[in-house]
């Protein structure tokens, strides 16, 4: 038989073509990215090593009372020193991508007011090169909450327009040093969460809020989150502009932003509650996406907030529209019910979301005493896989089916390390159920035509969960608190199998060879 005929038959037998509607065929395209996600502060540790500068989270965690178990990320899970071992774990899982963030203060200990730390550059070069040798694509965030403390001290970081210059300078350095090998960039991780928690409720650095919203010494909850967001949006545009004008053509990568995206289910079918759910999206996610993609804040935010919402100049608007983004990164974990508080009176708990600043909506996990899904170890995380398909479809429709990556999704359990490494802590069936339910929902969205290009599970390892410290565990691998030894959980085996089942055979999808990292990035940008 002709070789080409053989090839065609083989293709038909083995290649998981995304045949719409056929449940027996994998809807995941052959170049779909499967990976795990991490962030520098939560994983790296080595907080004083090799010339790294201090960042806002170093300062914040060392302030007593900020972290529930008094812990910090000084050592975290020591990924800085153990990355080779961790990359071996990834290789074993069979992932083809790894989402991580660069520690800004490791590259620029004093922002643009000092020199580039060569040891920091070397570390990420080693990490990136080792990944590529294993056929794993780096998917890199420029910042994941951590920024050099210097910027905070000098001019109040995100509250000042000066920060745009710093972010642009830093982004340029990253593209210059790493962009020959990194083909997927994101500017910010969850800027919506960072500003809400940093400047409205004050539970993240720089701990600013008004007394009605939280317990801070300084701040203005009704204004500052919007100012910080404004500077972040313009910083994003500045970095994308640098990428587009100086690097993209020659390096051939793409650039986006990562938003935290919850699904907001109207608590009833009333028009008021439906509008409230839409308002909740405006005040949470579209707050950033609409300016970045369309050059303006959502109409409803402008109407409600008036002069508390900064305005874009004509020049800014032009810049935003011309730079935009190539894809949206979506961190989706859970869903909420939304109740209208504009036309009806809601119980006023400070910071519960019901105020004008938060769009007059009440976000709640229960309806008539029944929770939206199964509860987990974190008070905000309920299992509601339908929400994944709904949020993907919502974004697809609102933003013209722009390419999407699920940059985070995952499940947490309580830390039971008091009992040591038990059978129970490794046999994480609840995590497997969660992941498989959410992946099914993604498959469904793909079948219905959403342009989804990757999925990153949070997370490869148990790690430092911000204000929750080490009290909750998100890992496919258990990490021992004293020895930092990594042990695979049932979910690791499950994810490995899932990827194997949904990946085209070797012959049809060659693994990347070291140096040829061009194979997987898309060309529709
Ligand atoms: C992501 O944050 C982070 O990117 C990642 O670093 C983190 O480890 C991971 O998820 C797991 O938490 O508190 O009422 O606003 C998600 C943080 C916390 C943001 C919960 C959305 C919604 C409920 N999320 N929050 S509320």
Image: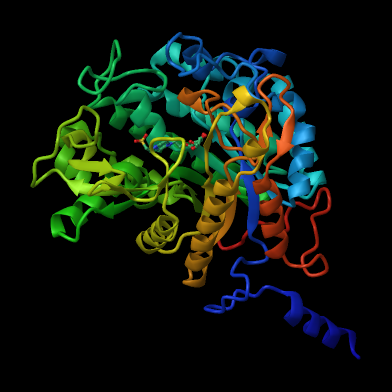
Residue 31, percent from left and from top? 67, 62
Split into 4 quadrants, where in the image is the C terminus? bottom right
Residue at 59%, 69% in the rendered image: 27
Q: Residue furthest right?
A: 1
Question: Picture quarter containing residue 229?
Answer: top left
Compared to residue 357, the image places residue 260 above or below, namely below
Residue 52, percent from left and from top? 64, 16
Is residue 280 rendered to the left or right of residue 78? left
Residue at 71%, 57% in the rendered image: 497
Q: Which residue is more in the foreground, 360 or 439? A: 439
Split into 4 quadrants, where in the image is the N terminus? bottom right
Residue 122 visible in the current orientation:
no
Question: Picture quarter containing residue 419?
Answer: top right
Q: Which residue is more in the foreground, 33 or 120? A: 33
Residue at 41%, 59% in the rendered image: 386
Residue at 72%, 15% in the rendered image: 50
Q: Which residue is more in the foreground, 228 or 312? A: 228
Which color mode does the image show?
rainbow
Residue 271 visible in the current orientation:
yes
Is residue 171 rendered to the left or right of residue 91? left
Residue 449, percent from left and from top? 48, 70
Q: Which residue is more in the foreground, 385 or 144? A: 385
Compared to residue 386, the image places residue 362 above or below, namely above
């Amino acid at each position: 038989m002709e070789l080409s005929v053989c090839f065609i038959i083989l293709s038909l037998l083995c290649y998981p073509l995304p045949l719409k509607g056929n449940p027996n065929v994998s809807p995941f395209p052959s170049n779909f990215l499967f990976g795990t996600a991490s962030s520098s502060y939560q994983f790296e540790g080595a907080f004083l090593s090799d010339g790294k500068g201090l960042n806002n989270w170093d300062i914040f965690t060392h302030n007593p009372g900020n972290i529930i178990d008094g812990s910090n990320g000084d050592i975290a899970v020591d990924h800085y020193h153990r990355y080779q071992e961790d990359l071996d774990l990834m290789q074993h899982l069979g992932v083809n991508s790894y989402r991580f963030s660069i520690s800004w203060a490791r590259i620029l200990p004093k922002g643009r007011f000092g020199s580039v730390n060569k040891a920091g550059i070397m570390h990420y070069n080693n990490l990136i090169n080792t990944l590529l040798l294993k056929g794993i694509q780096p998917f890199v965030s420029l910042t994941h909450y951590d920024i050099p403390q210097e910027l905070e001290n000098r001019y109040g970081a995100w509250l000042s327009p000066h920060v745009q210059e710093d972010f642009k300078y830093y982004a340029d350095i990253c593209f210059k040093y790493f962009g020959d090998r990194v083909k997927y960039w994101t500017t910010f991780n969850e800027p919506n969460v960072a500003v809400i928690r940093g400047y409205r409720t004050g539970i993240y650095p720089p701990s600013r809020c008004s007394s009605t919203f939280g317990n801070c010494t300084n701040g203005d909850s009704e204004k500052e989150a919007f100012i910080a967001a404004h500077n972040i949006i313009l910083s994003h545009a500045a970095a994308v502009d640098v990428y587009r004008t100086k690097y993209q053509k020659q390096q051939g990568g793409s650039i986006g932003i990562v938003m935290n995206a919850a699904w907001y289910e109207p608590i009833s079918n009333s028009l008021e509650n439906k509008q409230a759910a839409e308002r909740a999206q405006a005040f949470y996610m579209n707050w950033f996406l609409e300016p970045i993609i369309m050059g303006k804040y959502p109409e409803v935010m402008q109407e409600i907030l008036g002069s508390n919402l900064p305005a874009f100049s004509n020049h800014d608007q032009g810049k935003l529209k011309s730079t935009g983004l190539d894809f949206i990164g979506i961190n989706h974990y859970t869903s909420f019910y939304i109740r209208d508080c504009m036309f009806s009176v809601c119980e006023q708990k400070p910071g519960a979301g019901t105020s004008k600043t938060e769009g007059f909506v009440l976000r709640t996990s229960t309806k008539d005493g029944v929770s939206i899904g199964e509860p987990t170890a974190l008070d905000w995380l309920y299992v509601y896989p339908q929400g994944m398909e709904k949020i993907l479809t919502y974004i697809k429709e609102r933003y013209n089916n722009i390419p999407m990556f699920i940059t985070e999704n995952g499940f947490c359990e309580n830390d039971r390390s008091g009992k040591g490494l038990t059978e129970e802590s490794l046999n994480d069936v609840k995590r497997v159920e969660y992941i498989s339910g959410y992946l099914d929902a993604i498959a469904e969205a793909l079948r219905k035509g959403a342009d989804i290009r990757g999925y990153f599970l949070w997370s490869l390892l148990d790690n430092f969960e911000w204000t929750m410290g080490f009290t909750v565990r998100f890992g496919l691998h258990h990490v021992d608190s004293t020895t930092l030894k990594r042990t695979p959980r049932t979910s690791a085996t499950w994810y490995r199998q899932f990827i194997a089942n949904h990946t085209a055979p070797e012959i049809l999808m060659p693994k990347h060879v070291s140096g040829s990292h061009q194979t997987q990035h898309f060309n529709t940008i």
